[in-house]
Amino acid sequence: MKYHSFPGTDLSVSQLCFGCWGITSDFHWGDRSEDESVEAMLAAVDAGVNFFDTAPMYGDGASETLLGKVVAENQLRDKLVIASKIRPDKMRPSDVVADCEESLTRLQTDYLDLYQTHWTSPDVPIADTWGAMRELQSQGKVRHIGVCNAGVGDLGDLVPLQKPLTNQLPYNLLARMIEFEVQPRCVKEGIGILVYSPLMHGMLADKYNTAAEVPDGRARSRHFTTDRPKARHGEPGCEAETFAALDQIRAIAASVGCTMAELALAWTIAKPGIVSIIAGARNADQARQNAGFLERSLPTETIDQLDHATEELKNALGSNPDLWDGGDNSRYR
């Protein structure tokens, strides 16, 4: 396992972060076995993963609760970097403090290594929220602060106050939207990018050959027609471009002798500004596989082939970094 050390800090995180969204059952991931989730988390630790990302929104607190239980029962707190987030409806300064306290209780810890905004609120200036987060940092309840899903406007507001340590963003071979504006800005400012949905909910793990095979809970993104039951983006989607790209990625993977998932993760970690990839695992075998996938380095020629194979889809999705909402990408101000 390789690690990234943030300049000017004592924080070092594994290039693979265990994503805790799917460790409990919900509408997106379906039913999950708690025993298998626990085994997956412990297997990740054994493979060298020291970074775990969760949020109150994941299972309405159930994800934080299970992670806290595993960490406490296995005496792992001093060995792990734990990140959580503020609920989008708790962005007012007084609510930030209460939300953090609730997360600390569920996680059975007295500090978070990284505390992040989950989404920008249209009703609360992000600078106000940031002030409350800095106060928590001064109290020692959070060590470092960052953002998720922050656009160039948000970054412009925050950098003069205090540069976020990280920006957590959706990014993968099928979702390259941040390349237009957000990724270059993060690189310029020295803000580390944490990538979520690196396998695009199983699509880059070669789980589906057609759009019809993708469950409605996972077919909410802008790749799919807005007629899917849980979609809210209001766009026509780009299913033809998506599955044409998958066919090409599958062929490239075969040509270099690796799986699509291995190829996808290796491509992502090679891109500018990426410091860690957040990937969940249903069981211990998946956790070990994900860790192994990041051991591979891709030659420039293969990266270029993958860029070309997904260029049409990149242009079809455009510069709106949001996976779920279409239109004016107002959530990424």
Image (tube, grey):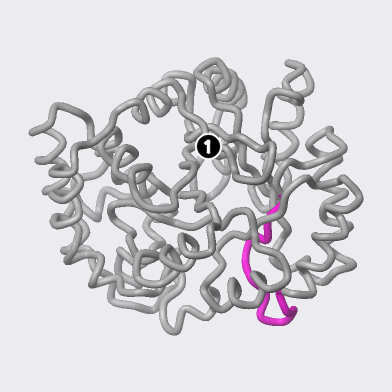
Tally the numbered discs: 1
Residue 122 in magenta stretch: yes
Relative image position of residue 48 (x, y in whole percent): 53, 21
Q: Is residue 295 left or right of residue 137?
A: left
Relative image position of residue 1 (x, y in whole percent): 46, 24
Which residue corresponds to the image point at 67% horizontal and 71% vertical from the top-left?
Answer: 158
Which residue corresponds to the image point at 61% horizontal and 41% vertical from the top-left?
Answer: 53
* Mark 1 crowd level (few <14, some 14–19, many ≥20, 10 Å Cα): some
Most foreground residue, 150 or 73: 150
Q: Residue furthest front?
A: 8
Tell me the kind of residue under disc 1: His
Find numbered disc 1 in the image and state the secondary structure of the residue it sits on: strand
* Residue at numbered disc 1: 4
- The magenta-colored residue range is 115-126
Most foreground residue, 97 or 130: 130
Which residue corresponds to the image point at 53% horizontal and 57% vertical from the top-left?
Answer: 190
Residue 195 in magenta stretch: no
Which residue corresponds to the image point at 30% horizontal and 71% vertical from the top-left?
Answer: 317
Relative image position of residue 70 (x, y in whole percent): 71, 23
